[in-house]
Image (cartoon, helix red, strand yellow):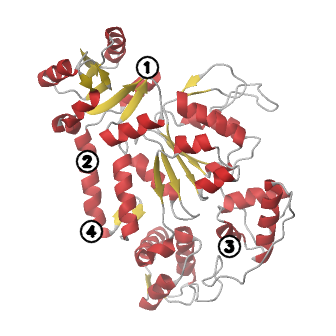
Amino acid sequence: MGHALIVEDDADSAELMAALIATQNFSVATAHSLRDARRQMALQTPDIVLLDLQLPDGSGMDLFADPQLTAQSEIVLITGHASLDTSIQALRMGAADYLIKPVNLKQLQGILSRVMQPSTLQAELASLNTKWQQSGHFGPLWGRAPAMKRIYEQISRVAGTAVTVFITGESGTGKEVVAQAVHDLSRRRKQPFLAVNCGAISPNLIESEIFGHEKGSFTGADRQHQGFFERAHGGTLFLDEITEMPMELQVKLLRVLGTGTFMRVGSTQPQATDVRVIAATNRSPDQAVASGRLREDLLYRLNVFPIELPPLRERSEDVPLLAEHFLAEVCQREGSLKAFSPAALALLSGYRWPGNVRELRNVVQRAYVMADGPTISDEWLPQTGQASSTSRLEKPQAASLVIPLGSSLAEAERLLILATLAHFEHQRERTAAALGISLKTLYNRLKDYGSTAAPDEKTPQS
């Protein structure tokens, strides 16, 4: 049985929370001041402390000065309202989560179900850092470049908290892998991790997919449907390409982040949700706001803890490590060992990789298939100044596009996408890389425009 300490100056509120916690297989003690809290902690070290910051004899932050408490007890802040400042404050002080008054039972149950000593998380992170120094990988991520070390430090700092993470970076840099790493190191690791590509879902269906719908709420809704927020309960919801989410839906997402509740399509009954949101985009967030693709207030809500991933060309020293890792995966899967020649590794290191890590993985898989013997030479690798099947090292000659003044943003986007596609001779991966969008988003845009795929192209899988 775990032990909880409630530090709350409102006696009625403290007793109500104590009664709720007692039903969750926890023993409970209450304190109404810092002095009482320290006395209770001396009697029994709590597994979890629910801490109000406003106390009669000082600030609850003073308890964070006790290293024994922060090492052995999970701390959850109690706040009268959810705010960006609260989230940042919680992170800086080392709090794992925060609850909004009046306390929601479902959210409280979720927090109690994943109580974990901070020292346990710290030991896991120390082990991961040791492995990274030895082999170059940190969980599912690979790389020894200084830029990646910074990413690992950020993941280590934020994973154990409930703070919202906003990941930015070019297509193919591994944003979903970073989100998965944050989830795997969090207290929510035993619960679902669901990834949603907002650009790959039809605008007519995205609200139903994310929030769910009631039976009969629209034509074809022949049964109740649980959305991603319900299916990810207790876990993490990764919203990729958030700038592709319709503006009217961004308003509803903002409400979920602020209140912890949502409503299915066709329902008037709010549903409580206990989900950590991680969002990502391959666009500049500020430019997305300026162009009307992202609400400014939603950006502020999402951008609590930003992580910016570097393109592969800015950490070229990691290319051999990544290539060897991807090759080992293919060899294990296919049951035949092959290795890169020194010339092949040198060629891979000198390439600029406009498609980033995703392109490198594809190139390695193709080279494995095409290599006749156990050694992979540079024959099937992208050559300097020559086109590979997905991109080329040298930038293409500059081309121009005239967009009439008065055109809508949607029309300007359509003209740019179609012109870029024609410029790259209908090679969609190269087009998507040049535009800074994912292949799925490009495919959906072309489908909206009524453009058909070339005969030798395959539709990207969701």
Please give the residue where the numbered disc 4 appears in the rendered image.
134
Whether tag 2 and tag 1 are in contact, CB under 8 A, the answer is no
Q: Is residue 199 visible?
A: no
Please give the residue where the numbered disc 3 appears in the rendered image.
430
Assess disc 4: are there few (<14), some (14-19) or many (≥20) residues with their C-alpha within 10 Å of its C-alpha: few
Whether tag 3 and tag 4 are in contact, CB under 8 A, the answer is no
Residue 230 lies left or right of residue 96; in this view the side is right
Residue 359: x and y in percent read 57, 72
Is residue 293 placed above or below 231 in the rendered structure? below
Is residue 383 placed above or below 91 in the rendered structure? below
Residue 322: x and y in percent read 44, 72
Q: Classify mark 3: helix, strand or loop.
A: helix
Residue 66: x and y in percent read 17, 35
Q: Nearer the viewer, residue 414 or 208?
A: 414
- Of marks 3 and 2, which one's residue comes earlier in the chain? 2
Is residue 401 placed above or below 197 in the rendered structure? below
Q: Which mark is residue 103?
A: 1
Q: Classify mark 4: helix, strand or loop.
A: helix
Q: Residue at left 47%, top 44%?
A: 304
Residue 285: x and y in percent read 59, 54
- Say which amino acid is labelled 3: Arg
